[in-house]
Image (tube, rainbow, N blue to C red):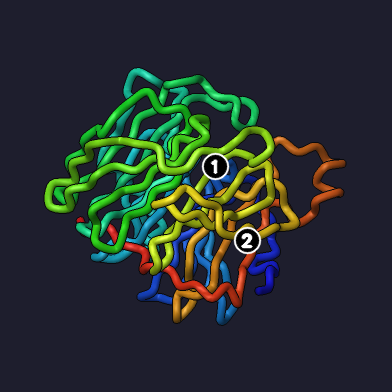
Amino acid sequence: MAVSVAVDEPGLLLEGPHWDSLTGTLLYVDIHGQHVHRWDPVTKQKDTYDIDCMVGAVVPRESGGAVVAAGTKFAFLDFETRQLNTVATVDPHKPRNRFNDGKCDAAGRFWAGTMGDEPVPTKVDRKAGSLYCLHTDGIVTKAFNEVDISNGLAWTSDNSIMYYIDSLQYSVDAFDFDLPTGMLRNRRQVKTFDPPVDGVPDGMCIDTDGKLWIAMFDAGQVLQVDPETGTQLRSINFPAPRTTSCCFGGPNLDIMYVTSSRVGYSAEAVQQKPLSGCVFQVTGLGARGTPGMCYNG
């Protein structure tokens, strides 16, 4: 196993990596930089799209371009014109809220959650967020509210379980998931963490064996966890303490891409951890991921 820097141009708060298998590119966002990035690991070229507010998540659209969860809006991003077209807005009475992480299910719905104002990393307006679903017909429904920091999402290969992280609950939760309707029920904890030793659970992905890979903010680690037993199986260390999220990519979905943050760091801290805010890659894991889903609307 080897950890190296994939994209060595540090951002502020990189998040939400998504491997687009159709184009062979890595999509990710810089929340505080207000950018969507699309990086080609073959040419090393990076396209950057300016967003007019903090952007929490991006996924490709089946019909071209991408859908973003930015500020408190769902919007379509046209890669050619670089224009945003707002589809829907949420949290109308919470102007300080913003979207955070998001991902699509196998039916092509886009799930993304909000969070309250965060003047200092992980210090937020408590219980101000919600988890939303943008259906393929453009309708938005709310799954539940009273969320602190809406974060990682993953589904089992048979689509019977959805895993979810609300970071300040320091746990990974599971729901019974109904793919035809997108309904959730029977919420329960499958893994809990011990702050501050373990760090803060952030973004995550799932491998073909059903094991979860969870980025631990403030711990500089990605942990592999068996959600059926709650057992930690492996840990990967990074030269950036604020690891934020991860996904599998590459032609064989066997390269792990990991995003990180330098938000809240002093100039001295950045000097001490200069790779903070970079995108890393991990090879030789002996694990493969499941394909990232597109929005089908």
5 and 290: which one is in front?
290
Q: Where is residue 176 in the image (x, y as percent from the top left)?
A: 24, 44
Does dot 2 land on a helix, a strand or a loop?
Answer: strand
250 and 10: which one is in front?
250
207 and 143: which one is in front?
207
Q: Position of residue 213 (x, y in %)?
A: 51, 57
Q: Mark 1 points at which residue?
A: 201
Residue, x 68% and y 68% (percent of image)? 3
- Quarter holding the C terminus is bottom left
Which mark, by number, is residue 279? 2
In the rendered image, the vertical position of residue 210 relative to residue 194, given as above or below: below
Q: Is residue 93 left or right of residue 46?
A: left
Q: Where is residue 2 in the image (x, y as percent from the top left)?
A: 68, 73
Label 2 sits on what residue type? Val
Q: In this view, does 43 lie to the left or right of 3?
A: left
Q: Is residue 55 left or right of residue 233?
A: left
Earlier in the chain: of badge 1 and badge 2, it is: 1
Q: How crowded is mark 1: few (under 14 residues within 10 Å), some or many (20 or more)?
A: many
In the rendered image, the vertical position of residue 258 relative to residue 92, given as above or below: below
Which residue is the extreme one toward the front? 229
Residue, x 29% and y 63% (percent of image)? 157
Q: Position of residue 269 (x, y in %)?
A: 82, 42
Residue, x 26% and y 42% (percent of image)? 133
